[in-house]
């Protein structure tokens, strides 16, 4: 048969019966066909015969691979790919309906439906962008509307992976009227090019016209897109609300850097506008397609037109996220945050880099040494333990097919060897028992493994070796221990080049000082002065990274990032994998997610550790506040190893997404593997607090405090419990205790100010709110600072700044339930009743308990019947007119 069957001749491709042609694209005909096996109708795109050249075939295959990555109700689904010597065909979902352009021409469509379509399109586009795919030709003709009124993105024939460097030499891919400026000029494009095209489509749906005028002259429209501002929306739709204009202005910015940074955020904005539209009856079903009555919800004062429509859009840039701070100071995360628990969430690949080898991998837990001594100073004991611990870890890194479990994960178990094996799902453990007397130490190194593969299996000794060393010869201790590990595994461990005794001792002292006292510039200078041979070891490089990033986030001084970058470049010869991990965290600290993504790819080329790689991806998505993708990668980690740490990680991601049920499920499972995992107890407390189960929350927080008194976030959370119980004096004491350990923590300050406010100490509370503003205004803006700052502004009646700060927060962290709660609070204090109730409803629907709306900040909403009904529906029927 021919490659492209004639439409009048019944024909088959494989088991697909071609029925009739239904369209033609740049690469071939599209047929309606019948799948004779599954008895369903499908669409089949057949490659044009004249395109049967290698590069066109490759392009067609690429289309199939790209589409196969996507599975979303608003994207046309691929079913099959057929390749034979004389034919290529792509089998897809058959959408029974019309394209959007045709549909709009033949129907009067209410504004509510148009906004619903834009939400769906943005959600589908976000999934494509998550997979690294750029559509490149997003327009009304490439949106299909099925019989149920659902929109579906189609024609990804010229879609391009963001990682694929091929270009089309014969023309600029895409349609002239929907191109971004960078696409029209033939420059490299990113997913933000699609956002510009989405802006054009949204403008057409909301205003009934193209933002750059008549589209009849292709060259003219391209020139306008490149160099002219779009037509102000009010010229086509005078009643278009400012919120709509603002979003269009962001999408249609000519500078890609000034467009939104996250397509999920764009989808959330369309969804919000759609919901507000429904609440306020912006356009009823019997209005004209573009008619929009006056928008009544209160909003900040601004002109109808956005700067984009005047000259060039100067967007409020999303602040760089304080990333490493989320690891070290997650105790300050927010009013109901788990605290230093995120140290476990995000540092899984932190302190010790894993040297990965081909399959089958085995994960090794190195247990911290146990030492008993007679006649030896405690400081020297610590140095001996440090030398042994360092030696074993560096030895495991060299073993073929063995991966080192991070020491933080082991420390968090806080249990026996059996407990550690169960919680980390370690394949093997290495223990070290040290007995010292005056100048000598006897060391026993033991290799343990489970008797069977069953979870309940007990550990048995695979091998054990005894060695004797001089206690004050730390190089000798390290080298002897390394050689013994090699003996345990019947391999030779490569020793470090000659290192002076005093230099190795200085490294051990630096490690101990960092653990006991934290980061300091003096520590960095001390490591800088060490010989290159020791600075190239994985443990030293990672120590330098930890100190540098701690100092950067404490001071916001980029000098520390520059120091780390220089160190990483100069001392990466022998530890490329370590250097790449350190570079990844450096990329994140600089807010350079594209570079971080490329660094992960380089790590993947050298590493086979899928658990570590998935955790790196998840870490990046968490700090980008993209919880859906973080959950995706954490699920992949669980497929590799279901550890207590991995279970906690995904539980915390679900908690931030607002899915309390899933968070509770995974946190409980984490505790079943590791009963003393204080982070999981802390998370259970947060979930209970969010659900209004105050006594249960107190029990969990008290358990977490007992397990780790250093985690002051749980003291803060106990204060929140007392605040909700109206025990304001106890709450004030909790917050004061937390602040005594972290005086500049704006979250603790905000809680203390709220407590004083509720006690009636208005002047004192205003002073504390003012201190939050002075502290946060000059700090690096992350979601926590923005959340606290927005509330502090609102409590001091500075609503203009509160709204602008809230907008920044919504751009940065729209998926977080605490963002919607903050929005509800700010709008309530500003007497924007409808906007507040909208956010109250979203907070309740996403899992926040009605108890959180008992606070008097929400009293003004009691005049609204909808608020009363909502609170009654969610367990607070007596909220109004009752006041705290």
Image (cartoon, rainbow, N blue to C red):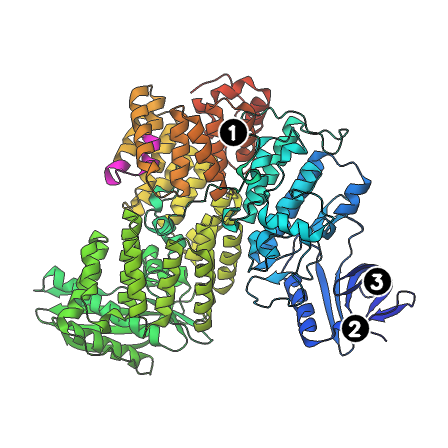
Q: Assign a secondary structure to mark 3.
A: strand
Tell whether label 3 touches label 1 (CB within 8 Å): no
Q: Which of the numbered marks, if any, corresponds to residue 302?
A: 1
Q: In which quarter of the image is residue 187?
A: bottom right
Say which of 841 and 549 sits in front. 549
x 17%, y 67%: residue: 384
In this figure, which residue is indicated by the disc labeled 2?
A: 49
Which range is magenta? 738-752
> Where, quadrant-wise, is the C terminus in this rendering?
top left
Say which of 355 and 431 sits in front. 355
The residues tagged by marks 3 and 2 sit, at their Cα atoms, a distance apart of 22 Å
> Where, quadrant-wise, is the N terminus in this rendering?
bottom right
Q: Quadrant of residue 175?
A: bottom right
Say which of 841 and 370 sits in front. 841
Query: Does residue 352 appear in the picture of this structure?
Result: yes
In this figure, which residue is indicated by the disc labeled 3?
A: 34
Tell whether label 2 touches label 3 (CB within 8 Å): no
Of discs 2 and 1, which sits in the foreground? 1
At which x and y percent is residue 229? 59, 42
Magenta stretch: helix, strand or loop mostly:
helix
């Amino acid at each position: 048969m021919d490659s492209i069957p004639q439409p009048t001749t019944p024909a088959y491709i494989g088991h697909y019966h071609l029925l009739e042609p239904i369209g033609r694209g740049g690469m071939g005909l599209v047929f309606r066909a019948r799948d004779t096996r599954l008895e369903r109708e499908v669409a089949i795109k057949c490659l044009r015969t004249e395109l049967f050249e290698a590069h066109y075939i490759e392009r067609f295959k690429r289309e199939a691979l790209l589409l196969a990555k996507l599975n979303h109700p608003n994207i046309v689904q691929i079913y099959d790919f057929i390749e034979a010597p004389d034919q290529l065909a792509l089998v897809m979902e058959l959408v029974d309906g019309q394209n959007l352009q045709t549909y709009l021409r033949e129907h009067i469509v209410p504004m509510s439906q148009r906004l619903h379509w834009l939400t769906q399109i943005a959600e589908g586009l976000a999934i494509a962008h998550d997979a690294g795919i750029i559509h490149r030709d997003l327009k009304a003709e490439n949106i299909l509307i099925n019989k149920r009124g659902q929109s579906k993105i189609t024609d990804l024939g010229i879609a391009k992976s963001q990682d694929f460097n091929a270009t089309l030499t014969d023309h600029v891919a895409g349609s002239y009227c929907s191109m971004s400026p960078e696409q029209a000029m033939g420059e490299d494009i990113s997913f933000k090019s699609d956002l510009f095209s989405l802006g054009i489509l949204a403008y057409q749906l909301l205003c009934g016209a193209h933002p750059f005028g008549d589209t009849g002259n292709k060259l003219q429209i391209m020139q306008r897109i490149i160099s002219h501002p779009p037509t102000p929306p009010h010229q086509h739709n005078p009643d278009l609300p400012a919120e709509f204009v603002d979003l269009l202005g962001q999408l249609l910015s000519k500078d890609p850097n000034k467009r939104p940074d996250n397509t999920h955020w764009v989808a959330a904005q369309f969804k919000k506008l759609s919901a507000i539209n429904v609440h306020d009856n912006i356009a009823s079903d019997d209005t004209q397609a573009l008619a929009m009555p006056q928008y009544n919800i209160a909003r900040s004062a601004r002109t109808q037109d956005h700067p984009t429509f005047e000259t060039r859009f100067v967007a409020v840039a999303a602040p760089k996220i304080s990333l490493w701070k989320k690891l070290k100071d997650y105790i300050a995360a927010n009013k109901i945050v788990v605290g230093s628990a995120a140290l476990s969430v995000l540092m899984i690949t932190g302190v010790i880099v894993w040297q990965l080898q081909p399959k089958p991998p085995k994960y090794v837990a190195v247990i911290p040494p146990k030492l008993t001594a007679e006649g030896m100073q405690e400081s020297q004991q610590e140095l001996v333990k440090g030398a042994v611990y360092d030696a074993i870890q560096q030895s495991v890194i060299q073993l073929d097919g063995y991966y080192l479990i991070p020491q933080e994960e082991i420390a968090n178990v806080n249990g026996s060897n059996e407990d550690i094996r169960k919680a980390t799902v370690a394949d093997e453990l290495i223990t070290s028992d040290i007995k010292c007397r005056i100048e000598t130490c006897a060391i026993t190194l033991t290799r343990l493994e489970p008797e069977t593969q069953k979870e309940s299996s007990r550990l048995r000794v695979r091998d054990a070796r005894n060695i004797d060393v001089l206690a004050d010869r730390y190089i000798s201790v390290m080298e002897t221990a390394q050689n013994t590990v090699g003996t345990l595994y019947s391999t030779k461990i490569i020793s470090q080049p000659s290192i002076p005794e005093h230099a190795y001792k200085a490294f051990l002292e630096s490690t101990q000082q960092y653990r006991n006292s934290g980061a300091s510039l003096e520590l960095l200078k001390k490591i800088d002065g060490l010989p290159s041979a020791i600075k190239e070891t994985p443990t030293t490089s990672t120590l330098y990274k930890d100190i540098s990033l701690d100092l950067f986030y404490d001071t916001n001084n980029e000098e520390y990032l520059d120091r780390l970058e220089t160190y990483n470049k100069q001392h990466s010869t022998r530890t490329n994998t370590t250097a790449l991990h350190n570079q990844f965290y450096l990329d994140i600290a600089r807010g350079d997610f594209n570079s971080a993504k490329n660094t992960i790819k380089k790590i993947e080329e050298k590493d086979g550790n899928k658990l570590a790689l998935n955790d790196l991806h998840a870490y990046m998505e968490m700090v980008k506040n993209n919880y859906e993708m973080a959950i995706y990668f954490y699920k992949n980690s669980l497929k590799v190893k279901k550890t207590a740490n991995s279970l906690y990680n995904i539980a915390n991601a679900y908690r931030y997404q607002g899915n309390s049920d899933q968070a509770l499920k995974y946190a409980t499972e984490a505790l079943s593997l590791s009963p003393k995992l204080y982070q999981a107890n802390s998370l259970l407390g947060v979930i209970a607090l969010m659900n209004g189960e105050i006594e249960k929350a107190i029990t969990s927080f008290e358990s977490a405090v007992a397990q780790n008194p250093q985690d002051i976030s749980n003291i803060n959370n106990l204060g929140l419990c007392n605040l909700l119980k109206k025990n304001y004096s106890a709450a004030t004491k909790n917050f004061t205790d937390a602040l005594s350990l972290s005086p500049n923590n704006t979250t603790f300050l905000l809680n203390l100010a709220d407590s004083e406010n509720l006690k009636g100490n208005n002047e004192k509370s205003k002073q504390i709110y003012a201190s939050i503003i002075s502290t946060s205004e000059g700090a690096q803006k992350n979601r926590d600072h923005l959340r606290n700052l927005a509330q502090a502004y609102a409590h001091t009646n500075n609503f203009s700044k509160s709204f602008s700060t809230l907008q920044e927060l919504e751009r940065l962290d729209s998926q977080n339930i605490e963002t919607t709660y903050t929005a509800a609070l700010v709008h309530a204090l500003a007497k924007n009743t409808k906007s507040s109730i909208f956010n109250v409803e979203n907070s309740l629907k996403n899992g926040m308990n009605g108890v959180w709306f008992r606070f008097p900040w929400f009293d003004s909403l009691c005049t609204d019947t909808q608020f009363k009904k909502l609170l009654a529906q969610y367990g607070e029927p007596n909220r109004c007119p009752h006041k705290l």
